[in-house]
Amino acid sequence: MERFKETQAYDRLQQELSTLGSRAVEELSKTAQNVVLPALLGKLKDLIGIDLGTQREVAKRSKLEHEAVSTAAATDAVADEQASATGASGGTTSPPYASRAGTGGSL
C-alpha cells in the first residue's frame, strides 16, 4: 500500500475522488436550495405566520436589479469609451450624397 501511495495513479485517484466529492456537495447544495429551504420556510410560515419566502424573493429580485443596473452602467461606459476613441481619431463620415447636395446637384 505504501508503494501505491507514491505513484501517479494514486495522485490521479485522489484528484478524481476530490472532484467527485465537490460535485456531490454542489448537487446537495442545489437540492437544499430548491427543495429543503422552501419546505423549511413553509413550515416556519405555518408556525409563526410570517412568509419568509417572499422576503427572500424580494431580496433576490433586488440583488438582480442591482446587478442589471451595474451591468448597464458598465456597458454604457464601454460604449462611451469606444465613441470617444472613434471621435478622437478624426474618423468622421458623411453620407455619399452630401458632397453632391452641397454643390447644387440633385439627390
Image (tube, grey):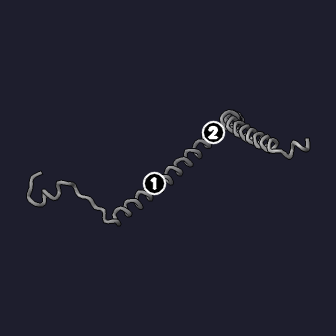
Picture quadrant of residue 86: bottom left
Mark 1 / mark 2, whichever is N-terminal: 2
Q: Tell which of 73 and 25 is nearer to you.
A: 25
Measured from the top left, where is residue 59 in percent x and y?
Answer: 59, 46
Could you tell me which quadrant the N terminus lies in?
A: top right
Measured from the top left, where is residue 35 in percent x and y?
Answer: 68, 33
Q: Please give the name of the residue rendered at 86% of the width and 44% of the height, measured from the top-left corner.
A: 5
Q: In the picture provided, is 89 more to the left or to the right than 24?
A: left
**Amino acid type of disc 1?**
Thr
Q: Please give the name of the residue rendered at 26% of the width and 59% of the height, measured from the top-left corner.
A: 93
Q: Please give the name of the residue rendered at 49% of the width and 52% of the height, measured from the top-left corner.
A: 71
Measured from the top left, where is residue 32 in percent x and y?
Answer: 70, 36
Q: Tell which of 34 and 40 is nearer to you.
A: 34
Residue under label 1, please give it: 75
Q: Residues within 10 Å of mark 1 (few under 14, many from 20)?
A: few
How far, Cα to Cα, is label 1 from label 2? 33 Å
Q: Please give the name of the residue rendered at 12% of the width and 51% of the height, measured from the top-left corner.
A: 107
Q: Eyeballing the image, is 71 above or below 51?
A: below
